[in-house]
Image (cartoon, rainbow, N blue to C red):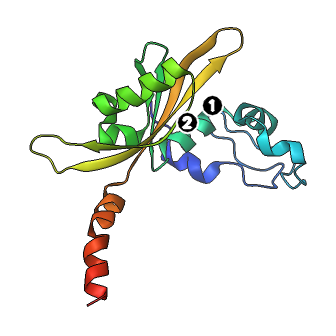
Amino acid sequence: MLPDPRARSRLPQPGTTRGVPVHRGLAPLDYPLAREPAAADAAIPFSRVAEELRVSAAAIDVLVEDLPVGVLVVDRDGRVMYTNESARAMRIERLEAIQWVVTRALLTEDAVREEELEVVTPGAPRRWLSAHAIPVRAAGRGVTGALVTVADVTARMRMRAWNPVIETLVNL
């Protein structure tokens, strides 16, 4: 079920403590966010940040659904468990290239970063994607799946292809 789009405007604002409307489990913060970050805070995991801020599952749903990049969550066997709106629009859960990136992350148990993939589909324009896959680990159980993000970088790749032509024209 998709979250209510009006929920975005009701998310707690930084520095507020009380009086923020509660919507579908979104609760206001009990303390302001204004504090100086400690040096150790630079590498704290997102789960701890979410816990500290008491971000509800509904708030995370709204944030992930609205990201401009595709997000997939896959289990240890590579089955897609979740896709956000951008991923569904790109139809990336069915692409073999994405499956390869996921498999590499799951087998090596290392992050795969900025893997550029050319996607050629008969009857459709060629496109390029940039994929990241990060293994998800559970305490005592090892890698249980992967979080995958995919961005459409077709415009950037097309511009890169035109760079030699542009340089030649500029040097005339």
Mark 2 nearby-residue class (10 Å; few <14, some 14–19, many ≥20): some
* 116 in relation to 9, above or below: above
What secondary structure is marked by label 2?
helix
Residue for point 81% across, 36% down: 52
* 164 in relation to 63, above or below: below
* 83 in relation to 116, above or below: above
156 sits left or right of 169 in the view: right
Q: Is residue 30 visible?
A: no
Q: Which image quadrant is residue 100 in? A: top left
Q: Amino acid at mark 2?
A: Asp
Percent x, y of residue 107: 49, 18
Q: Is residue 64 visible?
A: yes
What secondary structure is marked by label 1?
helix
Percent x, y of residue 56: 68, 33
Mark 1 nearby-residue class (10 Å; few <14, some 14–19, many ≥20): few
Query: Which residue lies under the disc numbered 2?
Result: 61
Query: Which residue lies under the disc numbered 1?
Result: 57
- Quadrant into which the N terminus falls: top left
Q: Amino acid at mark 1?
A: Ala
Residue for point 60% across, 54% down: 9
Of residues 84 and 20, the one nearer the viewer is 84
Q: Are marks 1 and 2 in contact (CB under 8 Å)?
A: yes
Percent x, y of residue 58: 60, 34
Q: Report the disc number at residue 10.
A: none
- How far apart marks 1 and 2 lie (CA) works out to 6 Å
